[in-house]
Amino acid sequence: MNTPSGVFLEAQGGEEDVECFLRGVREQAPPLAVISSVRSGDMTPVAENGFAIRESGGGGNAVQIAPDCDVCPDCLRELFDPADRRYRYPFINCTNCGPRYTIINGIPYDRSYTTMAGFTMCDQCRAEYEDPAHRRFHAQPNACPVCGPSLRLFDSRDNNVDGEPLETAVSLLKRGKILALKGLGGYHLAVDACNDEAVRELRKRKKRDEKPFAIMSPALADIAEFAVFDETEKRLLSGPERPIVLLRKREGNHIAPLIAPANGYFGVMLPYTPLHHLLLRDAFPALVMTSGNLSDEPISYRDDEALRRLADIADFFLTHNREIHTRTDDSVIRVFQGNPIFLRRSRGYVPRGITLPATQKSVLAVGAELKGTVCLTRGDKAFLSQHIGDLQNSATLASMEETVHHLGQILKIEPQVVAHDLHPRRATPPCPYGVLHGGKRVGGSGTRGDFRWYRIRTGWNHLGRRISGRRL
Ligand SMILES: [Zn+2]
Ligand SMILES: [Zn+2]
């Protein structure tokens, strides 16, 4: 069974078999499993046979939530197999791939705590979901064209566009139109990356003068046409996290110059949802795939909000009815002297825990004003949030507040200490935790390095329980 502290297993059999099983747990773990520790002990055998999964239970709080992940090779093969029942189905996934962090709204990680809760599985999907030998056994976002989410294409006044949404979207992009596209963690704005006029128009409407646009290409071979990459960059590009990687431009490439003017690099990524694969394959060597926002505002992720905010930028919207619960931008990495450096650690990596040298009090760190993220610690693990942005407007501040709340909720963390940048003109109030959640700062503040710390004594935290503070 799944418990909030992790997976709990009972196995019985001959000693050798049980040991072999225990080794298998580590050595043959599914691709997305991250095993932080295995603890085992003896039990008295019981007269039971067969295999059963019990209802998820409560208790403990050591659980970790998986990041979102690119389509796995098996699903990709099915996606383009005309004989498969999920042929060209934009929401194909399995236990080895698909959305996670962006659709989870509670724990344990069960379908009822995701934005897939409203979709009832058809008999075929249900059979896969319940079959321990199947790749979709307990794949929470499991879906097919019969029972799962579907696409919708409409114009900037919310009028449906005739025709098959995906094919029509491709032909609109070919004609140089600007498409708002609902992705994993938010909306992108897409245009044909080789169409100078379309890129110019996007830049104008987005009010973005110079900052480069990210590009998505269907395959490494297409990227090699316009950018240069080494083994490390190749590995990063094609890893399941699918970040944007900064790559040196190749001389004489066909990418519109306005994508990254006065810049020696392109920000490039490979497709990471079935929808991306379907949109790009055999259609475009590269699409601009830039965050769906006005400059300096957070990426749009709710449908009505996206329509409102992007109606003046996008000509058309390609969306679907699977809700995004958590806004998450693309991650951005640059390789420097052979080592990857995060310029933005977000989708694909969040909320993977980072191990600290020692167990400590739970800290909420709200970081600095520019390129903000938050961090919550629990025991010897630190959980950094997705990229939130520059905290220079109310929309971004609200996004930070949402993130603190959500991360605390799914990881079951009640911070005892708050740390933030000491800059006196930082946009957040002096004790962000207090203002965010109605708490009140009392006594015991001080400075350590660049950070100010506080003791917090009164007020209610975001989990609705009273908090008390201790020294960091
Ligand atoms: Zn898969
Ligand atoms: Zn189905």
Image (cartoon, rainbow, N blue to C red):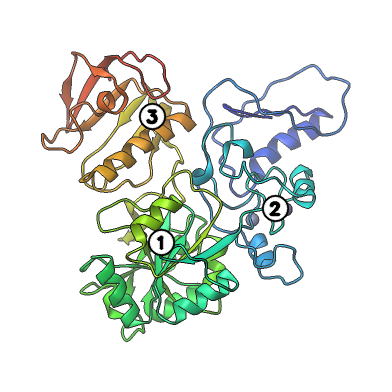
Which of disc 1 and disc 2 is earlier in sequence? 2
- Side of 458 where 245 appears, left or right: right
Q: What amino acid does circle 2 point to? A: Cys
Dot 3 or dot 2: first in sequence order is 2
- Which quarter of the figure has residue 26? top right
Q: Secondary structure at mark 2?
A: loop
Q: Residue at x 56, y 69 (%)?
A: 165
The answer to whether mark 2 is within 8 Å of ligand 2 is yes
Mark toward the viewer: 2 or 1 = 2
In three-dimensional space, the C-alpha distance between marks 3 and 1, rounded to whole angstroms, equals 31 Å
Residue designated by label 2: 147
Mark 3 lies on residue: 377
At label 1, which amino acid type do we have? His
Q: How far apart are labels 3 and 2 at the CA level?
A: 39 Å
Other-residue count near label 1 (Cα within 10 Å), few / some / many at <14 / 14–19 / ≥20: many
Which of the 4 image quadrants contains residue 369? top left
Q: CA distance from mark 2 to mark 1?
A: 26 Å
Of badges 3 and 2, nearer the viewer stands 2
